[in-house]
Image (cartoon, helix red, strand yellow):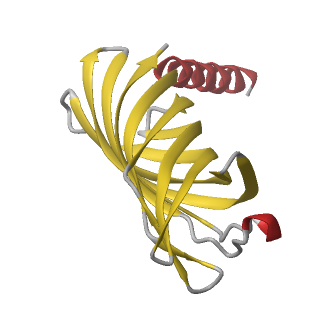
Amino acid sequence: MKKLAIIAGAITLSCVAGAAQAQNWYVGGYGAMNYTHDGNANGNEKMVYDLGFGVGGVVGYAMPNGLRLEGEIAYRSNDIDTIDGFPVGADMTSWAFMANALYDINTQSSVRPHIGGGLGVVRGTIETGGLEFNDTVLAAQFIVGVDYNVAPDLALTIDFRHLRTQDMGFGAGAGLGGVEYANSSVSAGLRKSF
């Protein structure tokens, strides 16, 4: 019985050790073209945004079964073109702090599609006339993309992200409550495994 337990223990340890070697930590960064969707404020005032930009970084862990878990920090910026048809000199920026789960589809090649999503919080800021108004709300995102392995430990990444948040309330000073915030971005970046 002891021999059987020792053999079973050895097999288990070798499996765990093999899995640990196949799992990889990684870091990555990206730049993005960011489109913030037109939305309403105060229930009926339409906010229209100009095309903007985004940057982000991730730290994650890739498992042998194709699942990746990662933390992401992203910054997005768009000018507000008009509110209820009137031009305004304002900017909308946000910091997103997301926990993502992604699945890499094994194609037996250097090209690997992936799909996933994330949950987290977004801190939005409207800046106008030297004044800033902030709110922090819950958020969710959908991610789809493709990686190209340029080396065994380095991948070029192209992603589409769609992020949505709860409505933001910027308070009486901004005159804006219930601001809808959703954006779509296309990004290109690099991911390094180690």
| Image quadrant where residue 142 sits | bottom left
User: In this picture, is 66 found above or below 125?
Assistant: above
Question: 130 or 139: nearer the eye?
Answer: 130
User: Which residue ends up furthest to the right in the rendered image?
Assistant: 172
Q: Position of residue 138 (x, y in %)?
A: 69, 61
- Relative to residue 4, is residue 133 drawn left or right? right
Q: Position of residue 34 (x, y in %)?
A: 40, 48
Q: Position of residue 119 (x, y in %)?
A: 62, 55
- Identify the residue at image location x=56%, y=65%: 181
User: Which residue ends up furthest to the bottom in the rendered image?
Assistant: 44
- Relative to residue 178, is residue 103 drawn left or right? left
Q: Position of residue 104 (x, y in %)?
A: 36, 41
Question: 187 or 116: nearer the eye?
Answer: 187
Q: How many marks?
A: 0
User: In this picture, is 191 found above or below 56?
Assistant: above
**Residue 22 showing in the rendered view:** yes
User: In this picture, is 111 found above or below 113?
Assistant: above
Q: What quarter of the picture does the N terminus occupy?
A: top right
- Identify the residue at image location x=57%, y=23%: 11
- Relative to residue 113, is residue 78 drawn left or right? right
- Relative to residue 49, is residue 114 drawn left or right? left
Question: 45 or 27: nearer the eye?
Answer: 45
- Identify the residue at image location x=40%, y=32%: 31
- Identify the residue at image location x=48%, y=52%: 79
**Residue 24 showing in the rendered view:** no
